[in-house]
Amino acid sequence: MNIDGQAWRTIGLEPDGRSVWVIDQTQLPHRFGTRSLSSCEQAAAAISTMVVRGAPLIGVTGAYGLMLALQNDASDAALAAAFDQLNATRPTAVNLRWALERVRDRVLALPPAKRAVAAREEAGLIADEDVAMCSAIGDHGLEIIQRLAAARPEVRKNKPFQVLTHCNAGWLATVDWGTALAPIYKARRAGLDLHVWVDETRPRNQGASLTAYELGREGVPHTVIVDNAGGHLMQNGEVDAVIVGTDRTTRRGDVCNKIGTYLKALAAYDNAVPFYVALPASTIDWSLDDGVAEIPIEARSPQEVTAIQGRLLDGPAAGTLAQVQLTPNGSDGFNPAFDVTPARLVTALITDRGVADASEEGLKSLYGCG
């Protein structure tokens, strides 16, 4: 995607071919920069501290993390240790384990001397496939947006098509294009008049900081709203569709996404607003059925709730980034990072292979038996 006229991915190999660069998302939207990762430990830290985040990008970073580990020690024991270290960083997103298993399975049968090169090749393939899958999601989602826009009442056809999204499921969450935002980018480039309501997405504000940043660089009209404004907008006819991403989708179509997604789905259902979830194949966990009962929900630091990061507006330190405490001393915080939206609240799943009902039958119609 574009930043100041330059095309970027979120991750890639450094010129030496032995280290990896990533966009440092903890500095956005106020500073754009990259960070170099040269060890498995650095890759694991980048994932756990959310220098990189978003299920598909976490998976690709994990794949490159195994490459970095194997460059240092290609033994079976080192491979197993690196796998476990990376896999433990973020427990909810299934893409991480999927990518790690894919690289591990590729290199296990090889002699140690060839493992690092094979891991580099496999990680590169995973990255390129992610771009292709996200582009395909955009194409399928574009068709939905065009159909919904054409079906609106005459009184609304001269107004922008209004999409509400939660968290960041754009190109910063993937290698390129994104999942939930890919249809929006495709629609914008196809000339459709649209506007995006961007949930701030507390507590880390990925919507306000990352989604708004992306949309602004792509020239997509958007407005940042507080998380609790979505229901009000739906009640008043200001939302034509909700499109979100997912970090893990069960075989029956339950979706696990950033905390607050479930409430948006309930509001959409109550107001007859279509609620779509965009995902690549790597996000489907065929081993799980009941998302509420079976998906592990990551609990992050309470400090993400009790404090917030921003750029100081005035004073001698104006322009610098700082952490600011929000709550009284002694107040605890609880910080589940995700919630689960049951399949019954999902209008349809927008995948890289097409659009499916949020059900086991719907997913199998596109992917067979997983």
Image: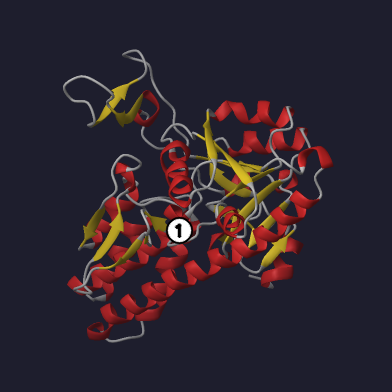
Residue that appears at 21% across and 72% down: 15
Q: Nearer the viewer, residue 62 or 207?
A: 207
Residue 168 position (above or below residue 361): above
Q: Residues within 10 Å of mark 1 (few under 14, many from 20)?
A: many
Residue that appears at 33% across and 58% down: 86
> Does residue 262 appear to the left or right of 347 in the view shown?
left
Whole-percent x, y for residue 344 in the image: 75, 46
User: SS of the residue at dot 1?
Assistant: loop
Residue that appears at 50% across and 42% down: 167
Colour scheme: secondary structure
> Does residue 330 appear to the left or right of 164 in the view shown?
left
Q: Nearer the viewer, residue 258 or 75?
A: 258
Task: Identify which amino acid the numbered label 1 is placed on.
Answer: Thr
Q: Nearer the viewer, residue 316 or 292?
A: 316
> Does residue 233 appear to the left or right of 122 in the view shown?
right
> Does residue 121 appear to the left or right of 186 in the view shown?
left
Quadrant of the image containing the C terminus = bottom right
User: Within the image, what quadrant is residue 152 found in?
Assistant: top right
Whole-percent x, y for residue 84 in the image: 34, 60
Q: Is residue 311 in view from this perspective?
A: yes
Whole-percent x, y for residue 295 in the image: 55, 48
